[in-house]
Image: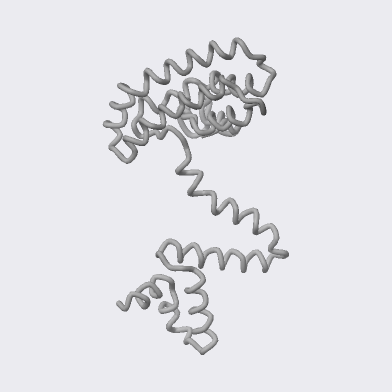
Amino acid sequence: MDAYGAYTHLATPKRPGGDPLRLAFCWAHGRRKLIKAKPQKGSPIVNEALLRIAALDKVEDAIRGSDPDHRRAIRQELSRPLVDEFFAWLKAQAARVSRKSDLGEAMTYMLKRQDGFRLFLDDGRVDVDSNLVENAIRSPAMNRRNALFAGHDEGGRNWARFASLIGTCKMNGVEPYAYLRDLFTKLANGHLARDIDALMSWAYTQQVNGT
């Protein structure tokens, strides 16, 4: 996760509805902040930081999809020393850079949240970054912005209907344009309402495959 302010309330002792949660911070977000803070003339500090983070990613690539116990064991053996060295090195570099500079703020961001960046080492269920989640929600997030141009309430409802049809197509491995063309052709030709199940995308898949 990133440092979105609302998340911090989940980690407070007075969290409504249960005990405080432990927040796992996303290494990809930390890396992006460093890249964004890199001066136009370049920065040996940022370059070195990215190399160190890349070493962590290499370990993760090798264990992605493994069971949690195996991931934890490998992380304890290979990743923990890398993380320890990274934060010791980052602290030393931060002492050389103004905290008010973009680079200083990027390093402080990671140093202040060190416990959250380390959490993945002790829990094999936790990913080193949130890239998989972000990739999964990118399409709905983009559609949310596009839907602002629906024009009016009925336009928004129609937009939602088409988004639902297209999303269902994707879930069923159906090419949306081909499906919608076939759907509207059948409707124009008087497809009976009582046979609506035959118009669903999963039924279209069976028709295309000849089953």
List the single residue furthest toward the right.
151
- Of residues 206 and 60, the one nearer the viewer is 60
Q: Position of residue 169 (x, y in %)?
A: 45, 66
Residue at 51% across / 23% down in the picture?
49
- Using the image, determine if residue 80 lies above or below residue 184: above
Image side of residue 58 versus residue 146, left or right: left
- Using the image, determine if residue 175 lies above or below residue 19: below
Quadrant of the image occupied by residue 81: top left
Image side of residue 164 versus residue 156, left or right: left
List the single residue furthest toward the bottom.
190
Image side of residue 189 versus residue 102, left or right: left
Q: Position of residue 8 (x, y in %)?
A: 56, 29
Residue at 60% across / 56% down in the picture?
143
Q: Quadrant of the C terminus?
A: bottom left
What is the image's colouring?
one colour
- Using the image, determine if residue 152 lies above or below residue 38: below
- Of residues 191 and 166, the one nearer the viewer is 166
Picture mark count: 0
- Of residues 6 and 44, the one nearer the viewer is 44
Residue at 65% across / 64% down in the picture?
156
Q: Position of residue 25 (x, y in %)?
A: 49, 29
